[in-house]
Image (cartoon, grey):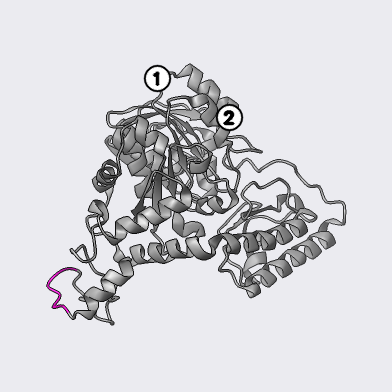
Amino acid sequence: MLIKSIEEYLQSGPSKFHIPGHKGDSEFGLPYDVTELDRTDDLYNSHGPIKRLENLVSGVYGSEFTIFSTQGNTLCIQTMLHLVFRNGGKLIIARNCHRSVVSTMGLLGITPVWVRVGCDENVSCEDIHKKLKENPDAKAILVTSPDYFGRMVDIKKIKSFCGDIPLLVDNAHGSHLVFFDSHPISLGADIVADSAHKTLPVLTGGAWLHVSKRFSDSAKISYEDAKESMRVFGSSSPSFVVLISLEKCALWLKKHAREEFFKLKDKVDKIKKKAKSIFLSYPILDPVRITLETSSLGIFGKNLYDFFSQFNIEPEFVFDGTVVLIPSPFNSDEDWNSLEFCINYIYKVSSLRHGLNLKITKNMPNKYHYEEPESKLSIKDAMFSEFETIEVKKSEGFTCAQIVSKCPPGIPILIPGEVIDKSKVKQMKKMKIKHIQVVK
């Protein structure tokens, strides 16, 4: 498809009087790094190989249509919200959203109706239902599922009571769920953003946005409409190298992915079984996410990172006593052997330190557990306000003018317009954040 059209173009030996400036020189660039031409198609006005690729992926996921992004899930989030919110409005949203959602709410003038996230679960369906009853004028519901720790939301249940209100899902960490029959688009979600590069063999920045038939029909949103919304935020020079990686992944999805992900699940189950008897303290719903809680064993912070790094294991995320590992079918047998050995080693050290009476907690750590925030300004007004930068230690009582988060996981602890309290100052200090922008 796409790679074939580019190869045919390159084989014709063209004199490249078009961007990019490296002209395919091997020292500075890749020959496949081309631009929008009649022979290579246009991401935002797709009619050739890109459109056929998107159709292929749409068939895998069961969407009405799927569109590609080379600017990550952020561009998919922006497109998704722009399709629903043109002139502001209320969005019922779980507090564990990514910072890209918050910045888009600010750009589009969206008013969040926050739903709390618990210690031992992702957002609850009951809390969403309650917020919906209290806010019947809400234009949409947005949840993050799976969340950063692998906890998933009951999409079917939420869809059963949201009626004509569109259900939007940030599925950044769940592109692979289609192979376990638990992808949000197949469970009733209206629009789903997938960060394909997080769990699939795609170059960084590769993502796709799925739109359901139900939403497309009811809202009269076409493939072309979605492309135009993406164009509002997207670069006019999308990466063809990333697009090619999306093509290779799409072909792999059709031929090999289901079998490979079930093999991966077997490996993860083996690790989880071993970990459960040691220090895994809560159920993880994503079948191939590994999240370990070691604080009850007295292993946390830098010590936890050092345990993994001495075996040359680089986790996705380490914070306090939690470590998140994101495996894929492309981890080697050596990777799995190292992880198993590391877990055995942690157990051995912990047993020597604490004896065999280990206290295993049953709840998800509450690092990203939020109560209802106090806000003085809308996100938009605070984001575009006059601001000053002050020391975090002096910021209590001020109104925040920026999104405060660490990536990973990219979950904001403070949002523009919110009042900075003592607990937030403490959190920022712990995250080694020294300065913050506040509204003048």
Tell me whether the residue at label 1 lies in contact with that at label 2, contact meaning CB atoms closer than 8 angstroms.
Answer: no
Q: Which residue is mark 2?
A: 125
Q: Which residue is mark 1?
A: 137
Q: Residue at x 30, y 44 (%)?
A: 223
Using the rendered image of the protein, determine whether residue 389 is visible from the camera's viewpoint: no
Query: For residue 137, which quarter of the picture?
Result: top left
Q: Against 428, is 116 above or below?
A: above
Q: Against 377, is 194 above or below?
A: below
Q: Nearer the viewer, residue 217 or 153?
A: 217
Q: Residue at x 35, y 33 (%)?
A: 217
Q: Quadrant of the C terminus?
A: top left
- Residue 359: % across, % down: 81, 47
- Residue 226: % across, % down: 30, 43
Q: CA distance from mark 1 to mark 2?
A: 19 Å
Q: Against 216, is 255 above or below?
A: below
Using the rendered image of the protein, determine whether residue 137 is visible from the camera's viewpoint: yes
Q: Nearer the viewer, residue 39 or 104?
A: 39
Query: For residue 146, which quarter of the picture?
Result: top right
- Residue 105: % across, % down: 35, 36
Q: Residue at x 83, y 56 (%)?
A: 354
Q: Who comes first in sequence, dot 1 or dot 2?
A: 2
Magenta stretch: helix, strand or loop mostly: loop
The region drawn magenta spans 14-19
| 364 sits to left or right of 360 | left
Q: Quadrant of the N terminus?
A: bottom left
The reply to whether the magenta stretch includes residue 349 is no
